[in-house]
């Protein structure tokens, strides 16, 4: 008795499906005269729902296949079967409605042929003028009337290939445009920071994407001019600094005038005193320190210049 009670408690917890598993493998074994009414009703409802879903799925599959082959009567029949098993279903209603429209269209073959030829002709004309979007739309209309027309199907494949090629080309153009605009932004940023060498490089990158672009060419020319001017100024600055270094070395007997490269240094008189006053030393020391800073700020303080400046400082101290 306790075992029986335990079994019924298990049934109540498991529900209809659990009841089948506990009481037996088949409905005949499961549903006995002692089976509770609410559980049997739930089980029966589940069985019916599963059967209807199975019938609905099968009918929709067969109906769609019939429609694809142009068998609209068969599609309509299967749509009705689907609606019996699943009333008011949107997909089944659409299958039914489309099949009815097709059947009505096919009832007047001459009219259908005229409509097909009109749509197919429009598709070919659109294809000829490279309007592939319109061509595809017209072909869909034509194939809606005659789904298995070979000429329309082949032309549709050609249209789809053209559309794919156009989309690929458009994507490439868009990517090139993004690359060009990014390079032009870099050019302007380089101008803003007075980095004219990089401005030239980015302008050249822009011109690789869009050769002969007037804006890119103008910016490149302008940046190139700035680079040339900067180089000239830099060269002049180096010459001035080296000239001052030679002048100081001549003044303090570290370089003979005739050995100097700069004309000014060759013409500079040497310091003739036997002793240098603190004030004069300070002036020479300040000149040497200023010269060192200018070399450093331009990245020009190489080993040779550094050695000359150290000799100058030592001479100033010991003079």
Image: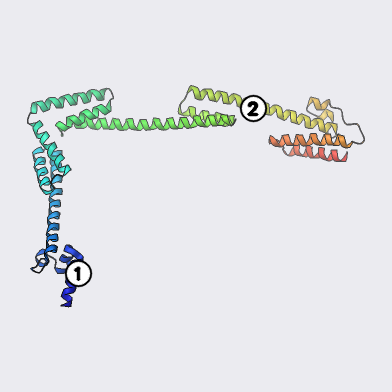
Label at residue 230: 2
Label at residue 10: 1
Left/right of residue 272 with respect to residue 11 in the rendered view:
right
Within 10 angstroms of label 2, few (less than 14), some, or many (20 or more) residues? Answer: some
> x and y percent of residue 186 in the render?
52, 32
> How many numbered circles does the render carry?
2
Depicted 58 relative to depicted 175: above or below: below
Q: Residue at x 57, y 30 (%)?
A: 192
> x and y percent of residue 299 in the render?
68, 36
Q: Do the residues labelled 2 and 1 touch (CB within 8 Å)?
A: no
What is the quadrant of residue 4 in the picture? bottom left
Mark 2 or 1: in front is: 1
The residue lying toward the viewer, choosing from 178 and 40, is 40
Q: Residue at x 19, y 70 (%)?
A: 9
Left/right of residue 144 with respect to residue 199 in the rendered view:
left
Residue at the farthest bottom position: 1
Is any atom of residue 149 visible in this view?
Answer: no
Q: Residue at x 17, y 32 (%)?
A: 143
């Amino acid at each position: 008795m306790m075992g029986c009670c335990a079994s019924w408690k298990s049934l109540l917890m498991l529900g209809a499906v659990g009841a089948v598993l506990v009481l037996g493998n088949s409905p005949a074994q499961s549903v006995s005269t002692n089976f509770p009414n609410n559980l049997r009703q739930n089980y029966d409802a589940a069985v019916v729902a599963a059967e209807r879903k199975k019938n609905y799925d099968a009918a929709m599959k067969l109906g769609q296949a019939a429609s694809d082959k142009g068998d609209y009567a068969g599609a309509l029949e299967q749509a009705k079967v689907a609606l019996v098993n699943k009333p008011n279903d949107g997909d089944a209603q659409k299958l039914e409605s489309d099949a009815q429209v097709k059947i009505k269209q096919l009832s007047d073959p001459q009219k259908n042929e005229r409509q097909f030829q009109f749509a197919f002709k429009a598709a070919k004309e659109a294809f000829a003028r490279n309007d592939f979007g319109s061509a595809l739309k017209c072909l869909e209309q034509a194939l809606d009337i005659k789904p298995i027309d070979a000429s329309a199907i082949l032309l549709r494949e050609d249209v789809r290939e053209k559309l794919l090629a156009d989309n690929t080309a458009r994507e490439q153009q868009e990517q090139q445009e993004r690359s060009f605009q990014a390079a032009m932004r870099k050019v302007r940023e380089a101008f803003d920071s007075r980095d004219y060498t990089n401005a030239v490089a980015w302008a050249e990158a822009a011109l690789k994407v869009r050769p002969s672009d007037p804006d890119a060419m103008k910016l490149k020319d302008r940046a190139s001019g700035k680079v040339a001017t900067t180089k000239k100024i830099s060269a002049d600055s180096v010459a001035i600094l080296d000239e001052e270094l030679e002048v100081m070395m001549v003044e303090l007997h570290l370089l003979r005038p005739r050995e100097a490269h700069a004309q000014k240094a060759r013409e500079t008189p040497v310091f003739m005193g036997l002793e240098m006053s603190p004030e004069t030393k300070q002036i020479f020391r300040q000149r040497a320190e200023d010269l060192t800073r200018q070399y450093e700020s331009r990245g020009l303080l190489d080993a040779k210049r550094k050695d000359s400046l150290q000799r100058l400082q030592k001479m100033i101290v010991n003079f």
